[in-house]
Amino acid sequence: MYSLFRWMVRLTSFVIVLVVLGAVGIWYFASRSLPDYNATYKVSGITAPVEIVRSTEDVPHIFGKTDPDVFFGLGLAHAQDRLWQMVMLRRTVQGRLSEVFGPSTVKTDELMRRLGLYDAAVASVAAQDAQTRAALEAYAAGVNQWIAQVNKGAMGRGAPEFFLFDNSISYWTPADSLAILKLLAVEQNNQFTREVLRARVSLLDPSWVRDLLPDMPGTQSSALPDYHTLFPDVPRAAQQEDAPEPLSPFPAAGLEAGSNAWAAAPDRSAAGGSLLANDPQMGLTAPTLWYLARLQLAGGGVIGGTIPGIPLIITGRNEHMAWGVTGAYVDDMDLHVEQVNPADRETYRTPDGWKKFTTKRTILKIKDSQPITLTLRATDNGPVLPGTHFDLGTVTPKGSVMSVDWTALDPHDTSMSAAMKLMRASDVESAIKAGEDYITPAQNLVVADQKEVGRVLIGAIPKRDPQNQTKGRMPSAGWLPENRWSGRLPYADNPREINPADGVVMNTNNKVTDAQFPANVTFDWGDSQRIQRLTKLLSDREVHSRESFMSAQLDTVSPAARNLLPLVGADLWYTGTPAPDGTPERLRQRALELLAAWDGEMSEHLPEPLIYAAWMRELQSRLIRDELGPLADKFTALDPLFIERVFRNSQGAAHWCNIIQSGTQETCAQIAKTSLDAALLDLKEKYGPNIESWRWGDAHEAHQDHPVLKNMPLIGWFANIRQSSSGGDFTLMRGKTIGTGPEPYTNVQAAGYRGVYDLADPDSSVFITATGQSGHPFSRHYDDLSELWRRGEYIPMSLDPALARAAAAGITKLVPAS
C-alpha cells in the first residue's frame, strides 16, 4: 500500500511538473510576440527618423519629418499591437477564412467571394488622389516592416494566435486598407435581412408588414405591393432558415451597428468653445475594433480612434476642429430578381432582351479539405447570390436568381481620399466639402470648429425611379427599367444642418429628413428612441460643458421603458389587496410595484431593468408566435414601435393580442398579464425567489470575447473579457442584448470608442476604448482600459508633444536603413 502511495505521489508530481513546464513554455513562446516599445529599428521606407512615443495607456504619438513617414509609423504600430486582428479582417473581406478554419467558414467565404468586395478595393486604388495613395503605400510599408522584423527576430510569429492557426502572413498592400474600409460597410448593413424579411412577411399576409416592420413616426410612405402578386411562383410558406455563419461580418437581424454624435456651438458652451461627443457602437470583441493614436502631420496634430488596417483617424480631433460619425442607415443596397432564360441558362432577362451573365471562376481553399471551385456570376445590376444566403431562397421565384446592387461594390470608391481630406480639414466648411467624394459606408458626419457646428450625411445615395415597384424595400424585378438605379443623388441634396438656431446638432441613427421617395434616404432608420432622450438632455440645460456631454454619453435611462410600461401595464397596476406571499399573484404584484416606482434607468444594480426586459421579450414573442410560426425567430430584437402600435390599436393592430388557435377572444390586457407571469417564473427559476435581489448586471453581462479563442478551454478564460454592465437596447449608453439563446440579455454591442472634445480647451478633451490597445492576451494593455470603460471613465487626449514625452512608457525609434 505504501509503495502504491509513493508511486501515486510521484505520478502526480510528474504531471504537475509537466503542466507547469508546458505553461511556462507556452508563456515563453507566446510572450516573444510582445513588442519592445523602447527598441530602435533600422528600416527601409522612411526618409528621416520616426519616433513612436507610447503613453502610459499605450497610445502611440507618432512624429516624423513627412506625412508618409508618419503613416509608416502608424502601420508599424498597428502591426505591433494588432497583427492578428488585421490579418483576420483582411482574410474576412478576401473570403479566405477557410484556409485557416476549415469547412466551418466556407459559407462566409463563398459570400464574400461572390460579392467581390476585395476586387472592388483593388480597382479603387487607382481612384485615390496622389496624397492618399502615398499614405496607403507608406502605411503598408510600415506594416510590412514589422512583419519583416518579426521574421528576422523570431518574435513569436507576431501574435500568439499564429501558434494555433496558420502562421503565413502575406505582405500588406494599399488595397487591403481599402478593403477593410469596405468591410465596415458590411458590418453596418441591414438591408439584406430587411428586404428579405419584409418580403417573407408579405407572403404570409401583406397587411402584417406595416405592424411588424413599421415606418418611423412621421414617415409618409406609399403602401407596398403584395410580394406574391409581383412574383406568384414564390411559395407562400417557404421555410428555409439560414444557420449562423461563424465569423460572418454581416450583422444578425436586430444587431445592426448604432452610434451617437452631437455638438454644441460656443454660445451653448459654458467655456465659450464648441463641444462635440461621439460614441460609435458596434459588436463587442476582444480586442475592440478601435485603436487610439495620435499623428503629427505637416498640417498639425490629429488624435482619436483608428481601426487597425486603415491609415485614418476615423473619429477625433485636430488642432482646429473635431468630428464624429454615426451610421446613416442609407438604403444603398437593392436586391433584384433576375429571370433566367429557360432555353439558355447562361442568359438572363434585361430591358433590351436576353443577355449573358458575366462569369469568372475562383478557387476556395479549405484547411483539411479539398478546394472548391466557385463560378461567380453577375448581371448589369450586380453579383448573383445563391439562395443559401440571407434566406434568399424563400423569396426567389422559380427559374430566377437574385442579384444585388450596392454602393460598396463601386470599383471607383474614393471614400479613403475623402476621409483623408476630412482628417486634415480646418473648419466645418472644409470638412463638409471633404465629404463630397465619400461613398461608403454612409455616415452622418457631425463637425465642430471654434465658431460653428454642423451635420451632413456623407455617402452615396442611389438615384431610384419614382415608379420603382418596391421603393427598394423588397426585391424587385431586375429586368424592369424603373427598378434599376440611374446613378446617385447629388451630394448637395444630402440632408445637412449647419449652425441651427438652437446651436445644437445631433444624431443617434434617427431620421434626418422628411423628403419623400426617392429622396427619402431610407425607410429603415436605426433609432426612434435614443433621440428622445438626447433631445431632452440637451434642451434641459442652457449651456453645456465637457462633463455634461460625458454624462449624456453615459446616460442609461430607457425612453422605450418609460413609453411602454404605462401603456402595456395600464390595466394591471392596481390589483387590490396583496396576495399571499409565495404565490404567482404576489410575485406579479411586487414586480408591478417596483416598475411603477422605477424611472427607467437601466442600472446594472437594479432588478427593474431585468423585469422590464423579460416582460417585453415574452410579450412580443406571444404576440407574434402564433401568426408567424418559425418566422418569429427572426424578430428576437424588441421593437417598441410594434408594441406601441398593438396597444394603441393603430390601424387595428390590437388583433395581434388574440391567440388565433384558441376558441376565445383574448385582450391585450390579458396577454400582457400572462406574459408578465411567464417572464417572472423564468426569472425566479434563474435568479431565485427574492425579487429584490435580482440584478440587471447579472443577466446583462458585456461579452467582449476573442472571435476565435473564445470557446477554447483555459485559453478562452484569458482571452475573453466579461463584465457586468448597465444600459440597454435603447439607452444612450447602449448595451444591445443578443435576444436569443439561454442568455438572451447578454450585452453584445456597445460603444467601443467614446470621445468628448472641448474646443475651448482642446487638450482637456478625453477618450476611451472598450478593452485596451494591445491584441495580445499576455499584454498588460490587452484589457487595461476595460474597467475604466465599464465605470464610465476616460483618459486625456492631448496634442502637446511635451506631455506625450513626459508621460512616455516607451519610445520606439525608426531609423532609415541607408
Image: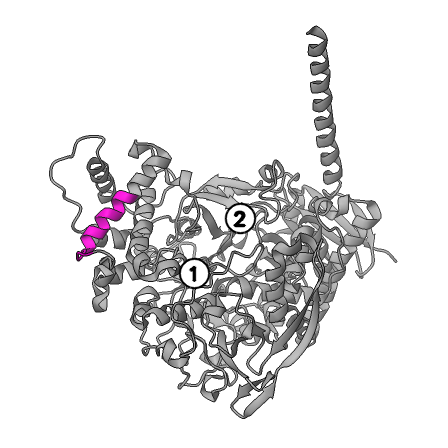
User: Is residue 516 found left or right of 669 in the rendered image?
Assistant: right
Above or below: residue 807 compared with residue 243: above
- Location of the N terminus (image quadrant): top right
Residue 739 among magenta residues:
no
Q: Residue 695 carries which label?
A: none
- Disc 2 marks a residue whose amino acid type is Ile
Please give the range of residues in magenta.
Answer: 663-678
Q: What element carries label 2?
A: strand
Compare residues 715 and 508 and report the one nearer the observer: 715
Residue tagged by mark 2?
768
The amino acid type found where label 1 is placed reads Trp
Q: Visible in this render: residue 559?
A: no
Predominant SS of the magenta segment? helix
Residue 74, how many percent across, how many down? 69, 56
Question: Circle 1 sits on which residue?
Answer: 262
What is the distance, in whole Å, between disc 2 and disc 1 at their CAs?
Answer: 17 Å
Does residue 367 lie above or below 509 as drawn? above
